[in-house]
């Protein structure tokens, strides 16, 4: 962390965790959330949909794709999965 210009984190909780470890880095931390703002992006009920779930991301154990696939099957929904990785 000492040689970095900035530290990018995705939540205030991660920022607080870094700050607890050392006040030295707090001025370098920038929080950039990586979620969908549902106040700005939301489904248009007037447009018919063919797909219920879209996943775009790494296909790795870390992302728990197996759980996603099990939920898709259990719920009987249509899904598109886009990505690359060890589980492709």
Image (spheres, rainbow, N blue to C red):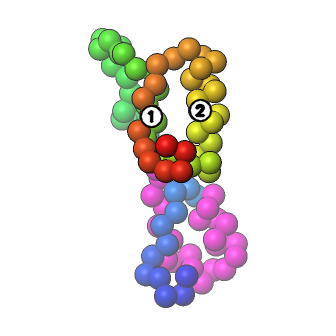
Q: Which residue lies furthest to the left in this view?
A: 47
Which residue is denoted by mark 1 in the rendering?
81
Give me the residue at 52% from left, 57% from top. Answer: 10
What segment carries the magenta color? Answer: 13-34
Vertical side of 48 occupied by 60: above or below: below
Number of residues whose C-alpha sits closer than 10 Å to that of mark 1, classed few (under 14), some (14–19) or many (20 or more): some
Membership of 17 in magenta stretch? yes
Tally the numbered discs: 2
Please name the residue that numbered disc 2 is placed on: 68
Looking at the picture, does residue 33 appear above or below residue 41? below
Tell me: 11 left or right of 39: right
> Is 37 displayed left or right of 65 in the figure?
left
Overall secondary structure of the magenta stretch? helix
Residue 12 percent location from the top left of the image: 58, 58
Q: Pointers 1 and 2 in contact (CB under 8 A)? A: yes
State which quadrant residue 75 falls in: top right
- The one of 41 and 23 positioned closer to us in this rendering: 41
| Label 2 SS | helix
Q: What residue is at 63 percent from the left and 71 percent from the top?
A: 18
Near-viewer residue (37 or 53): 53
How many angstroms separate mark 1 from mark 2 (CA)? 10 Å
- Judge whether residue 46 is colored magenta: no
Could you tell me which secondary element the residue under label 1 belongs to? strand
């Amino acid at each position: 962390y000492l040689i970095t210009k900035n530290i990018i984190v995705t939540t205030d909780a991660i920022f607080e965790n870094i700050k607890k470890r050392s006040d030295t880095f707090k001025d370098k931390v920038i929080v950039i959330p990586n979620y969908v703002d549902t106040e700005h992006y939301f489904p248009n009920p007037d447009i018919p949909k063919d797909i219920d779930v879209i996943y775009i991301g790494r296909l790795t154990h870390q992302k728990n794709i197996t759980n996603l696939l099990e939920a898709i099957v259990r719920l009987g929904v249509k899904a598109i999965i886009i990505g690359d990785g060890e589980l492709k």
